[in-house]
Amino acid sequence: MEDKFLEYFNKYKDDIYRLAYSYLGSYSDTDDVVQVVFMKLFKNINKLNDNVKGWLIKVTINECKTYFLSSWYKKITLFSDEIDIKDKENENDLLDEIMKLDKKKRVIIYLYYYQDFKIKEIAKLLKMKENTVKTNLVRARRELREFLKEENDEEES
Amino acid sequence: MKKKVKKSFNSVKMSKDVEKKIMDETVDKRVVKNYKLRWGLMLCLVILGITFKSEIVIAAREIVSLIWERGILITSNGNGYRVFEDVKGVKYNEIPSTYMVGKEFETTVEEVEKILGIKLLKYDKASSNNVYCTFLPVIEKHSERKGKIDRVYLRQLNFYTNYGYSELLGLDYGYYLRTEIISSEADEFTKLDFLEELNTMGGKNMLEEYYSNNLQTKVFIYNYDYKPSWVEVEALFVYKDIRYEITGVFEKDVPLDDLKDILENMHL
């Protein structure tokens, strides 16, 4: 059981961490959520079928949603007019730009470009309509392309 | 772009500290078993839970009744729903979610019926009487004040309830019912979107279309033409101006007879 857990943990820990980070936009919140996710994996390891990665992604998304709905999170947002969601500077500009997008777009970008999921699969995972996923993806691409274009122009000059 | 996005996310990694914490809580099992503290904490949680639950119900009643009759003051920021502003009836601008407070709450079917003065279809074998209720507000521009969102009205109200739903391994296997009610004040875009679910059926494979004697309306049963790690079948129908969508999510096959049995045994 422990070997199996360690195998999956080492294989997927960073993917799951990135997914949670793309959703939550904060390293400290991500640390909390991934701990819950892997605790659940440990408890359920013997009941899982082959698609452990799919299970982990689904559980992570659910946990991120729950985290946003938590009374603790609501209290924090209620007492601060504007939350600075970054608690640590990222080392690359593109990631900073991605994290400036709203959370739906960030997750879609991550699942589409990093995890190579199809639009239909993303729609199902996030419980969204396919058209909503497409629209968000188009808008996110547009925003990022503008940034990438500026970056290229700067490099050329 | 794909390469660049991948490269940018590669720098995001789990820290050694977090890894160690997870190991401590799982494989190493170095959990400190302080029972006194645990019982004290549980007692506090129970008290908090009771207080919080009653507050939620009261808040839900106030919020929904206010919005249903149009107009609620949004006074604080927070993360919530994305809202679209209708500009000249054609273009839709997104209002930043930071202006909105998310409104999702758990309540009961009875509470919802009482608040809205409607009757929702029920199924005797529902595993839970609880309903997750979300609403989609729309901004109403009564105020000339710039940069302030003053009033919204309810565009659409969604309820989720579960039939045999279980949080099996964190996945929502079983049946769940989604109910959507559309406000008479909804814009044309929303109304069209509401109706299109029945009319266009884009990207869906129709499995069965039949007239339900129980519901006295046409029911559409369909699935999707892709193969995720789970199987999903949906039944869609409109009953007394409320759109119902029953979704069956399973690891393998979803028996159609089972789904039809639910449909034919629903009642007010």
Image (cartoon, rainbow, N blue to C red):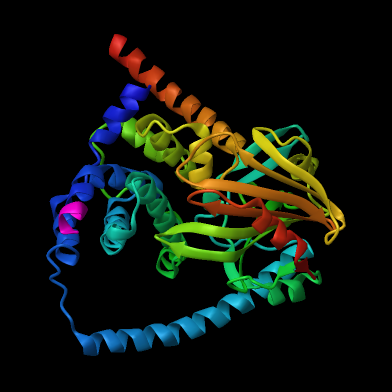
Q: Is residue B203 above or below residue A3?
A: above
The residue located at (34%, 15%) in the rendering is A152
In reply to whether residue A3 is colored magenta, the answer given is yes
Q: Is residue B191 left or right of residue B30?
A: right
In reply to whether residue B267 is colored magenta, the answer given is no
Q: Is residue B85 left or right of residue B175?
A: right
Q: Is residue A120 left or right of residue A58?
A: right
Who is closer to the viewer here, A45 or B2? A45
Residue that sits furthest to the top in the current view: A156
Question: Which part of the image, by quadrant, shows the C terminus of chain B?
Answer: bottom right
Image coordinates of residue A94 in percent, x first then y, are 33, 30
Question: Which part of the image, by quadrant, shows the N terminus of chain B?
Answer: top left
Image coordinates of residue B58 in percent, x first then y, are 63, 79
Who is closer to the viewer here, B227 or B70? B227
Using the rendered image of the protein, determine whether residue B151 is visible from the camera's viewpoint.
no
The residue located at (29%, 14%) in the rendering is A155
Span highlighted in magenta in the image: A1-5
Who is closer to the viewer here, A101 or B73? A101
Who is closer to the viewer here, B261 or B24? B261
Predominant SS along the magenta part: helix
Q: How many discs mark residues in the rendered view?
A: 0
Q: Is residue B244 above or below residue B197?
A: below
Image coordinates of residue A34 in percent, x first then y, are 29, 55
Image coordinates of residue B262 in percent, x first then y, are 70, 62
The residue located at (76%, 76%) in the rendering is B114
The residue located at (56%, 66%) in the rendering is B164
Q: Is residue A130 above or below residue B194?
A: above
The picture quadrant where one finds residue A47 is: bottom left
Q: Is residue B87 left or right of residue A72?
A: right
Using the rendered image of the protein, determine whether residue B108 is visible from the camera's viewpoint.
yes
